[in-house]
Image (cartoon, rainbow, N blue to C red):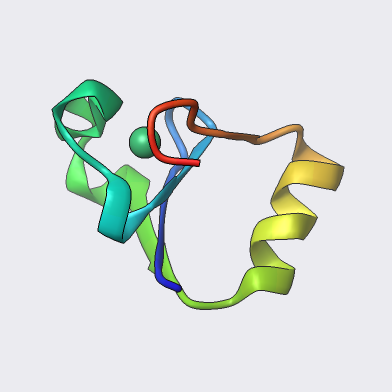
Amino acid sequence: MKFIIDHSMQLIHRTPYAGDLCNFQETPLLQREGSHDESYINKLIKEKKYERCDYCK
Ligand SMILES: [Zn+2]
């Protein structure tokens, strides 16, 4: 599974399900990060209060 991390909105998207409703297109490219690392994702959620996007979780 590949994820898109939106650091400006502090949201985690799942790439295969991400769409227009996710709205990360408005986030500058520099604030977005792609990752395959589930433990990194979980760490962001637990320690930095990032949330999984409702539209693609
Ligand atoms: Zn999303």
Residue 55, by quadrant, is top left
Residue 15 lies left or right of residue 45; in this view the side is left
Instruction: Report the number of discs.
Output: 0
- Please tell me whether residue 7 is drawn above or below residue 40 in the rendered image: above
Tell me which residue sits at (45%, 73%) in the image: 1
Tell me which residue sits at (47%, 40%) in the image: 7
- Please tell me whether residue 3 is drawn above or below residue 5 in the rendered image: below
Residue 10 lies left or right of residue 33; in this view the side is right
As drawn, which residue projects farthest toward the right? 47
Tell me which residue sits at (54%, 32%) in the image: 10
- Please tell me whether residue 33 is drawn above or below residue 25 in the rendered image: below
Q: Position of residue 9 (x, y in %)?
A: 45, 25
Residue 26, by quadrant, is top left
Give 43 or 56, whichever is nearer the viewer: 56
Q: Position of residue 36 (x, y in %)?
A: 48, 77
Residue 45, by quadrant, is top right
Ligand 1's image quarter is top left
Residue 21 lies left or right of residue 47; in this view the side is left
Give 48 or 1, whichever is nearer the viewer: 1
Q: Position of residue 21 (x, y in %)?
A: 23, 22
